[in-house]
Amino acid sequence: MNIDTLRNEWDELTKEYNELEDCNRRYIELLEQLHSHQQKCFNEIKHQRYRMNQITASLKQCKTAQTPEEKSKVEELNKNTLKRKAQIHEIEQSLPTNSGLYLKIILGDVNVSILNRNDKVRYKDDYEKFKLILNVIGLLMAFLNLIFNYRALELAYIFLLVWYYCTLTIRESILKVNGSRIKGWWRAHHFISTAAAGVLLVWPQGEHWQLFRTQFMYFNVYINIVQYLQFGYQKGLLYRLKALGERHNMDITIEGFHSWMWRGLSFLLPFLFGGYTFQAYNAWTLYKLTTYPPGAPWHVSVMCGFFLLLFSGNIITTLLVVPEKIRERA
């Protein structure tokens, strides 16, 4: 290839680069326009809320001495107000949202809002895959720890738990910013589990740990099997409910039992209650270990408290759902 041919190719590449520069310039202009439109949307939302609050306050004063026609108009306005609030909430899902304190502490003041709807769903699906894959890895490692009593293998597994729950809390916080309706207890459950895994990581090798170790590994094997069943069945049920328009696109699978799971997943309840009973049994075992053998490290009593807290939160949250659904079916 001679120098003239190379020169021609370079000139052609330069033209393409000029097109790239022009494309980038238009892209930057659109980004600036996007920011301007976002600010305008925020201002309009603020205005809508302010005016709705005024109308709602005035409606409360119109409740006395009303004719049937006036009552009908008031009722219609109340319905329209509720509908408008839902519409504004839907609009907010397409705008950047405050990350919240936890993400600001972990990631800094970074915008984690995913504005594209398809990207939101893709991120949620990636979260579901992450849980399933780590669940299988956790099950295998817990099973290996039942067969082999090696400290390095124990620490690797416990470190995996710390990393898994830390990552889970961050991902769930990002999902919540982007519209996932994650209930408060199930988020708190993962924060507590992160702290518990951290305590396990620094629990020194000794008699108390060895007395609890096998039971703890059996517990993890059981929990991982139940969670794998849950995540698999919940994913299928959520897909059907979303297709019917009965669930939100950003709803996710959880470790516990929620009202929407009653249709098709109630068979999992005995397994869930079995897991909760196992948590209570862990708390009881650790409580006994605080007194005998003597000289129990502080990790024993702290883990006892964590398991008791997890059992209480899980059982109460589930029991609040079950009676309500039984009454609905009666």
Image (spheres, helix red, strand yellow):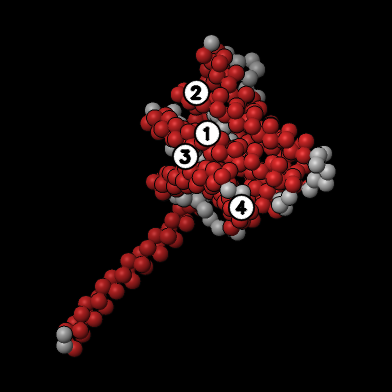
**Does label 3 or label 2 sit earlier along the sequence?**
3
**Does label 3 or label 4 sit earlier along the sequence?**
4
Toward which corner of the image does residue 74 lie, by quadrant? top right
Quadrant occupied by the N terminus: bottom left
Q: Which mark is residue 226?
A: 1
Q: In the rendered structure, are the residues bearing label 2 and label 1 in contact, judged by CB atoms less than 8 Å apart?
A: no
Q: In the rendered structure, are the residues bearing label 3 and label 4 in contact, judged by CB atoms less than 8 Å apart?
A: no
Residue position marked by numbered label 4 in the rendering: 150
Tag 3, which secondary structure? loop
Q: Which mark is residue 267?
A: 2
Q: In the rendered structure, are the residues bearing label 1 and label 3 in contact, judged by CB atoms less than 8 Å apart?
A: no
**Does label 1 or label 3 sit earlier along the sequence?**
1
Mark 3 crowdedness (10 Å alpha carbons): few <14, some 14-19, many ≥20: many
Is 286 drawn above or below residue 68 in the view shown?
below
Q: Is residue 299 left or right of residue 183?
A: right
Of tags 3 and 4, the one toward the viewer is: 4
Q: Does residue 126 appear anywhere in the picture?
A: yes
Residue 314, image x, y percentages = 63, 31
